[in-house]
Amino acid sequence: MSELTLFNRPGLSVRIRRFLADRPRLNAVLPASGIAVGLLVAGAGLLRPAPRPIVAVPPGYVALVNQKGILTSDFISQTQSESGATFDQTTPAERRRVLHEMIDEELLVQRALVLDLPETTTEVRDAMAAAVNAQVAAPLLEIEPTDAELRTFYDQHRTKYMIGGTMTVHDLVLHYGGYADADQSVAQAETDAAEAVYQLRSGAPIDYVKEHFGFVDSGRVSDGEELEFAAQIHLGPKLYPVAAALDTGEVSDPVVDKDGVHVLVMEKRQLPRPAEFSAVRDQVYSDFRAAQKQRASEENLATLRSQAQILLAPGQAE
Amino acid sequence: MVRQQRIITSRAAVLALALIALLCARRPAHAGSASVSYSTWVLSGDTVMLRFVVPAAEAQRLTGSAIPVLTVSKLGDYVLHHTAVSASGQDCPAIDQGYDLGRVDPVQVGAGLYGFEIFFRCGAPMQSLVLEDHALFDRAVDHVDFARIEVGWRFTDQLFTAARQSVHIADPAAVPAAGIWQYVRLGMGHVAHDAGEICFLLAALLLVRGRRDAALIVFGLAAGHALSLLAQAWGLIVAGEPLIGAFAGFLVALAAIAIVVPELRRPQVAITGWSILLLMLALIAAGLRALHPALLLAGAAALSAGLLTAVRRSGRQPWFASSLAVVMGFLGGFALPSLLGPLHLPERSEIRMAISYDLGALLTAAGVVALVAGAVALVGGAGRLSPTRSGAEVLAASIFGGLGMFWLVSGLQG
């Protein structure tokens, strides 16, 4: 009996139709409800409230400039900084002046953004890049390094903290290609220099070599003893490493530089010795901080590059 | 007699179909296709500062480049050579702005917009000023530049159109504002170029029974425009300009379906199917996290179900076309305000402009309705627009339905 009832049961749509036919008021209300709901939902999708301008300064702000707020905390800091007194001690006139300046500054910053100065002006770009670097380094710089950390850094960079080195060195140069040496080619000068080095190493006097091959003093170093750092500056990045590798009485191989072929003769050399940690602690501290900043900046740039899309023009490389 | 009436009716239908075919090539003006730009002219001392703003799509059309750097460079030169100022009959040259900027400074004016600043310095006294803007009218005849002229704290709104490419200011202390008639003309031009609205009017005319009922469409549009003004005064704006075009497309499709539904053997299946289709599109949009399109489609589904069920039960009643016209008029009322955003005008100014614009739109719509109703009456010689549904009418409805659906989907994408 129950199965028969189940099979004879009318379909859902028929039942809905019958249900509605029995209730004529509901029958009329349903389409109207659909229309009303449809209009409301579509209206919600189509419309939104217009952003209303803020007409009152919200708490925590001292002013609004073109809807952009100036923080009360910034105002207090600026007033204290400019007056050199606590905020309570400043006069209303001082506060008005500071607020006027801050509003002027905000207007100028807003104008700078409209003019797109971060994209177009080198000074602004430099300042922004420096600010970003300072910001990423700030968390590291907030933690004071311990002496152990500084000492480890000192040990790792011991060569940077050397003192007491001196050298008495002769820098002989064989010019080529100039007005007075028009016939001298680079290859010929190198051959002559190699022969001169051989003779110097065999015990020939410097004056003889100068006279015989046409070498002259380069004038980069003084005749007498020079401190290590002074010699480094005077000789330059190409010749100093060669000189630093020589010991007393040694003669360098020929070194080709812009002004000719050089030969260095080390008359007297006193090697620099490592400075005591306590003597150079301030410098170590400064270098440690600089290294921290550098590392933070590099890590930040690595992250930025990983997220950036960078396209290079054909033939360009970085 | 019956045969003669059928011939007349089919002639009218052929006429209507020819009109539709002509319109098929056009896009609805709602769908972000309006050619507009914005200019602000600041009169100060002996200088006129012009800030010219061009929407990115317009800029891309003009320069043919989607690369911002190239667009900025080309567009800056173009704006410089198509704007000018003169005072007391003498030209005010654009001055070099220093650094390596030259005479045009590209400025940041917001996402999707390109902005340029030019400073015109006048050697002559700042009297009898003439502000000239010829930009973009050579590319689009219906281009409109919404302008704002500022003198100190005061400002007035102005319009540059192809027919009016210069504004004369006799005395900077009393800068004239654009007249109401200019916005009326703008509204008239907008409807005349809006294939979506014209198609809607034609589809709605197919729904009504006689010329008196046709007037209800115009009343519906007027009511819709009035409601939109109220909504604007209430502080509502459209969530996205392409959504207006999408919903207008939906209304065209809905009118077309309402024409066809009474002719079907199983109308409820068509109504349910159409509503479910919209609901499914809403679900897809929701899945794509497009909240506003999803709500729009869900609302369209409920509206379709309600309206079509009502029309099925009551037959072709004039109130149906009229109520669709109310919604269409409501959408049309947001056409101008949705374009004015970058000009940052006060609400009162926008509503004044919108009233004039809506009046123009309404006049044109009324003209179209009267023209079509009159033409059909002349051809048919009867007081009824369409006493029976001919095959041509159903075909026309199908075309409207297809167009409406296309505009709905393309609007939601845009």
Image (cartoon, rainbow, N blue to C red):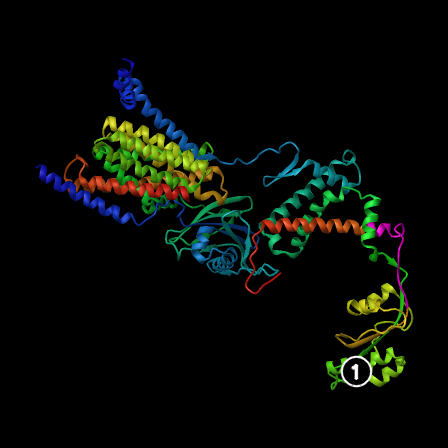
Q: Is residue A2 above or below residue A305?
A: above
Closer-to-camera residue (A287/A117): A287
A281 falls in the magenta region: yes
Residue at the extreme left: B1
Q: Which residue is mark 1?
A: A192
Q: Residue at x 77, y 36 (%)?
A: A90
Q: In which image quadrant can residue A100 be found?
A: top right
Closer-to-camera residue (B5/B337): B5
Q: Position of residue B309 (x, y in %)?
A: 28, 28
Q: Residue at x 32, y 35 (%)?
A: B221
A214 falls in the magenta region: no
Q: Is residue B346 above or below residue A197?
A: above
Q: Answer with left or right where residue A171 lies relative to residue B302.
A: right
Q: Residue at x 65, y 35 (%)?
A: A61
Closer-to-camera residue (A9/B247): A9
Please rate how many residues cluster around mark 1, counting C-alpha atoms within 10 Å: few if below 14, some from 14 to 19, many from 20.
Answer: some
**Identity of the amino acid at label 1?**
Asp
